[in-house]
C-alpha cells in the first residue's frame, strides 16, 4: 500500500533521456524515415537512443548539468624509455 514517490532528480532519468533523444532524432531524420519505413526506423531510433545514453548515470547528469563526468585527477605522464646503444662486439682472442 505504499506508493513510490518520484524525486525531482529522477526527472532526467535514462528512460526520459532516451525518449527526448528519440523525439529529436525523429524530427531530424524525416528523409530516412520515409526510406526505411516506419517500423524499421523506429527500431533503429530506439537502438540509437540507447547507444547515446549508455554509461550515463542520473547522478552524473544532475551534478554537471550536461552529462559529462568530472576528471578526478589528471592522467600521469607517460614514461619515455631511453634507447640502449648497441655494445661493441668483443674480438676473439688470437693465440699463436
Image: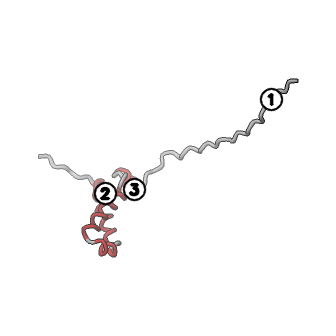
- The residue shown at (31%, 64%) is 44
**Crowd class of label 3 (few under 14; some 14 to 19; many from 20; radius 10 Å):** some
Q: Position of residue 77 (x, y in %)?
A: 59, 45
Marked residue nearer the N-terminal end (2 or 1): 2
Q: Alpha carbon of mark 2 to alpha carbon of mark 3: how far? A: 10 Å
- Mark 3 = which residue? 67
Please determine whether, in this image, residue 14 is positioned above or below residue 26: above
Please determine whether, in this image, residue 91 is positioned above or below residue 2: above
Q: Position of residue 94 (x, y in %)?
A: 85, 27
- Mark 1 = which residue? 92
**Crowd class of label 2 (few under 14; some 14 to 19; many from 20; radius 10 Å):** some
Question: Toward which corner of the image does residue 27 lie, by quadrant?
Answer: bottom left
Q: Residue furthest right?
A: 96
Q: Nearer the viewer, residue 85 or 4?
A: 85
Q: Is residue 76 left or right of residue 6?
A: right
- The residue shown at (59%, 44%) is 78
Marked residue nearer the N-terminal end (2 or 3): 2
Q: Alpha carbon of mark 2 to alpha carbon of mark 1: how far? A: 78 Å
Amino acid at each position: 500500500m505504499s506508493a513510490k514517490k518520484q524525486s525531482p532528480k529522477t526527472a532526467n532519468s535514462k528512460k526520459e533521456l532516451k525518449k527526448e533523444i528519440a523525439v529529436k532524432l525523429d524530427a531530424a531524420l524525416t528523409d530516412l524515415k520515409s526510406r526505411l519505413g516506419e517500423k524499421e526506423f523506429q527500431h533503429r531510433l530506439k537502438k540509437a537512443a540507447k547507444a547515446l545514453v549508455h554509461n550515463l548515470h542520473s547522478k552524473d547528469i544532475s551534478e554537471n548539468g550536461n552529462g559529462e563526468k568530472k576528471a578526478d585527477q589528471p592522467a600521469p605522464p607517460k614514461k619515455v624509455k631511453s634507447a640502449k646503444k648497441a655494445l661493441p662486439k668483443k674480438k676473439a682472442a688470437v693465440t699463436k
